[in-house]
Amino acid sequence: MLQTSISNPKISDLKTAQKLSRRLKATGDSKLEYIDVRGSGGTCLVMFSAASNHNLKDEEGEKTQSQAGWVLVEAEISENNRMSIHPKANILGWRSYKIKRTCRSGFAAETISAVE
């Protein structure tokens, strides 16, 4: 949410960042833990990508820019070489970013998200 306003920040964005910082400090006992995901069928890499069209404001304040993102996951494979409904998994990487090209449709934004 904050990254969408980084090019033109406002006081309200700073207040939101402060609230988020306080919330993170209050939940300081949370941790990210990587687990052994090797199932009987081994592991696989799965990438999820998504995008939204015209959800970011440009310099004039009009919503003309698009947002994209992806998550890379290592997941277990069961004995029958399929992912289970609730597999053990680790997030290996992620990215959320503004698409540089102008997208005319949601399909175009999704395609660019999958390719970049």
Image (cartoon, rainbow, N blue to C red):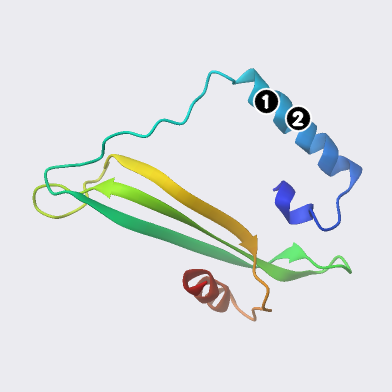
* Residue 43: x %, y % from top left: 23, 50
Q: Quadrant of residue 60?
A: bottom right
- Check disc 2 and report the residue beneath it: 19
Q: Secondary structure at mark 2?
A: helix
Give the label on residue 23, or none: 1
Front-most of residues 29 and 87: 29
Tell me how far mark 1 sits from mark 2, CA to CA: 6 Å
Crowding at label 1, few (<14), some or many (≥20) Cα neighbours within 10 Å? few
Q: Residue at x 66, y 22 (%)?
A: 25
- Tell me if 11 is positioned left or right of 48 in this view: right
Q: Residues within 10 Å of mark 2 (few under 14, many from 20)?
A: few
Query: Could you say whether the residue bearing mark 1 is in a helix, strand or loop?
Result: helix
Do the numbered discs 1 and 2 sit on residues whose CB atoms are within 8 Å? yes
Query: Residue 7, relative to residue 2: is it above or below?
Result: below
Q: Tell me: 13 left or right of 108.
A: right
Q: Please provide percent x and percent y for residue 9.
A: 86, 50
Q: Residue furthest left?
A: 80
Task: Give the number of marks.
Answer: 2
User: Whole-percent x and y of residue 4?
Assistant: 73, 55
**Residue 5 placement (x, y as % from top left):** 79, 54
Q: Is residue 62 above or below residue 39?
A: below
Image height check: is 109 above or below 17?
below
Kindly identify the amino acid type of the residue bearing the numbered disc 1: Arg
